[in-house]
Amino acid sequence: MIKDNMRIKESITLQDRINAIETIVSFYFMDGDYTPYYKDEGEISAVIRNFIDGIEFEKGESVFSAYYNDEDLRKLVNMFILKPVDKEPESEEDERIQNSIRELYDMMETIRKYVADKVEFEKQKYLHANPDLDKIVMAADTIIDSFENFSRMNFEIFTPENLEKAQKIFNKISESGFELTTENIINVIKDASSFNMDEATKEIVDAKNSEIRELKEKIKKLENKKDNFKVIK
């Protein structure tokens, strides 16, 4: 940890407070789990990273270790996270300092309220999430992407043979124990429709090459006509 006139920021902006809220909330949901026991670490990290100037951490250095090992840093952080003790000020300067510390703590209490609201919101999202529905949406997106070119085709593709292939696709998707992953869906589509990527690619390339050859022939004929054409004045 490198200190250079370490101090509380002279002006704590709205963005600083928002960043602090987001930091603390992130500690409630570590690695996809609900981890409220990391709340204190979240508050310490949020204060150090958003409300204190003149401090720099080296790569891989622990913010929490710095808090526990450096008394000066700990005093600054505690002004935010620990409730100030009410006592009779001994002087005007002492009273000013006490009021400043109380303001910092009150600001932190407001931040905690926003954190609680955001955590509750995230918990509700998690509790009401439907994993099966998410998989269905993912599967639909994959199928739509796989058949994107169909939108540029005419309705003649809906032959009995193609409809039978589509039925095979959805029958396989509905089989018990099938995991709806992007890779599995693509494999099912290929298998059910007897789809050969190499052959399909070759057909597309051959068709494009044929179009290019025809276009070149047309251009050549037009050029010949142009050479034989004389402007009548």
Image (cartoon, grey):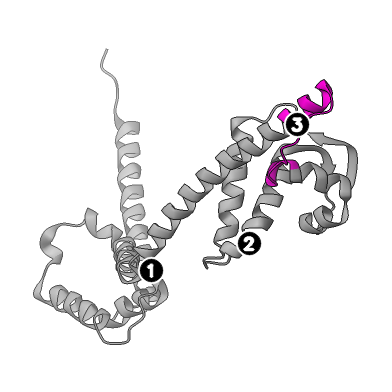
- What residue lies at 10% left-to-right and 71% top-to-bottom? 159
Instruction: Indicate the quadrant containing the C terminus: top left, top right, bottom left or bottom right.
Output: top left
Q: Is residue 76 magenta?
A: no
For badge 3, the amino acid type reads Gln
Q: Depth check: 80 or 154 in front?
A: 80
**Which disc, if any, is residue 201?**
1
Which stretch is magenta? 79-99
**Which disc, if any, is residue 38?**
2
C-beta proximity under 8 Å, tags 2 and 3:
no
The reply to whether residue 140 is visible in this rendering is: yes
Q: In terms of sequence position, does the residue under pointer 2 or pointer 3 come before the other? A: 2
In the rendered image, the vertical position of residue 92 relative to residue 139, given as above or below: above
Q: Depth check: 163 or 58 in front?
A: 58
Q: Is residue 31 left or right of residue 194?
A: right
Residue pointed to by mark 3? 98
Q: Badge 1: how crowded within 10 Å, few (<14), some, or many (20+)?
A: few
Q: Is residue 31 left or right of residue 50?
A: left
What's the distance in space between the residues labelled 2 and 3, CA to CA?
29 Å
**Which disc, if any, is residue 222?**
none
Secondary structure state at the residue bearing disc 1: helix
Numbered marks: total: 3
For badge 2, the amino acid type reads Tyr
Q: In terms of sequence position, does the residue under pointer 1 or pointer 3 come before the other? A: 3
Q: Nearer the viewer, mark 2 or mark 3?
A: 3
In the rendered image, the vertical position of residue 76 relative to residue 34, given as above or below: above
For badge 1, the amino acid type reads Thr
What's the distance in space between the residues labelled 1 and 2, CA to CA?
53 Å
How far from the left and from the top, in percent, is residue 112?
A: 56, 46
* Res 130 → quadrant: bottom left
